[in-house]
Image (cartoon, rainbow, N blue to C red):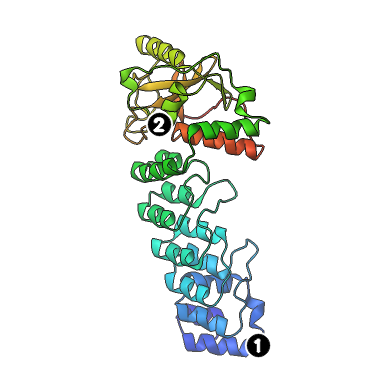
Amino acid sequence: MALSDALEAGDLRAFRRELAGRGHVESFAGTQLVLEVARRAPVTFVEALLDAGLPIDTPDRTGTTLLRAAVRADRLDTARLLLRRGARITELDLLDGVSWASTAVVAELLNVGVDPSGVDGIGRSTLQVAGERGNEDLVFLLLEHGADPLAGEDPPLAACLAGHPDAARVLAAAAGARLPPVEDLWEAIAYGLGGSSEDFWDDTLLPGELPERWSALPLAARAQLTELSAGRPVFGFTTLAAFEAVELADELVARPPPAAAVAEDGPIQTVGFHPSWVPLAREADQLLVVDLAPGPLGLRGQVLHVTRAGGPLGVVASGWGMLLHRQARSLAEDQLDTEPFTVPPG
């Protein structure tokens, strides 16, 4: 009986007998046969392969190891065995687990000590992936193991746009607790631009008072208008003084652009401009506004890209502090896009 036949029949004794007769079991390392064993066979078949001398970490051509195959297939017993037998674990294994596996499998991986804040090749962090799945148990598990809610491309926003507002709110609260004060974020931005805040910001446009209708403005956005000078660069936009923000908002509330072409149950209300949208930055007829009245799937305090002629284009950040954090990080990594945002409707 061939190995594949023994595997298909679920005959462990025949499987062990075939392995013993092969001699050079290491030649099977990284083949589809052994990966299929990790994906769907009882754990005793995987143990038989290891007992016969199969190298535990040899990948196939795509980089898939026994552990990664087991994780992607959500095989808890197999993943546990492989970890106990010394399988090497990487951040990508954890990301695969967060993408495809159960909370129990991810917990096994985390207990080995893998970095919980890993980021994949397109910039998505473990928390971002968990948020996009809408799996709050995974989000809490990763946070308990020290995952950084600021890693990746705005995990709260990713969960929000994936239609999981509860996970988004958990992530937003965690991110808010980790964000530095807004003045420190601006200092990091200035450093990334090659100087300090004294070298860049125009102090002629001073902060001012806000109307009562904006009393619920989150701390970072409030500080931007009431404590800091205007004229600062944000991804191709320039921050406003408080009086400019009030004048713009009053003008747009009185003469709003067309209503947003977005889903009624999405993250943005279907209006052209809402009285609870607070302009914080401008580039010609384009605005960045903080949204205090989001749609059913939105986050209070999310940042919208709005045009004076066409209304809101979409959500660009889960909050003002997160937007500044992303700009500071982009500057540090020398990857800043200085053009204004262009986003699809959120």
Check the picture and name the quadrant holding the C terminus.
top left
Residue 242's place in the image compared with 6, above or below, is above
Number of callouts in the render? 2
Residue bearing the label numbered 1: 23
Circle 1 crowding by C-alpha within 10 Å: few under 14, some 14–19, many from 20: few
Residue 44: horizontal and vertical position, in percent?
Answer: 47, 81
Tell whether 237 sits left or right of 266: right
Residue 30: horizontal and vertical position, in percent?
Answer: 62, 70
Q: In the rendered structure, which disc, 1 or 2, sits on the residue that comes first in sequence? A: 1
Tell whether 51 sits left or right of 212: right
Q: Residue furthest front?
A: 198
Q: Is residue 346 visible?
A: no
Check the picture and name the quadrant holding the N terminus.
bottom right
Quadrant of residue 24 in the image?
A: bottom right
Amino acid at circle 1: Gly
Element under disc 1: loop
Tell whether 215 sits left or right of 72: left
- Residue at 59% x, 21% y: name it: 201
Residue 32's place in the image compared with 99, above or below, is below
Amino acid at circle 2: Leu
Residue 204: horizontal and vertical position, in percent?
Answer: 55, 13
Quadrant of residue 246 in the image?
A: top left
Residue bearing the label numbered 2: 219
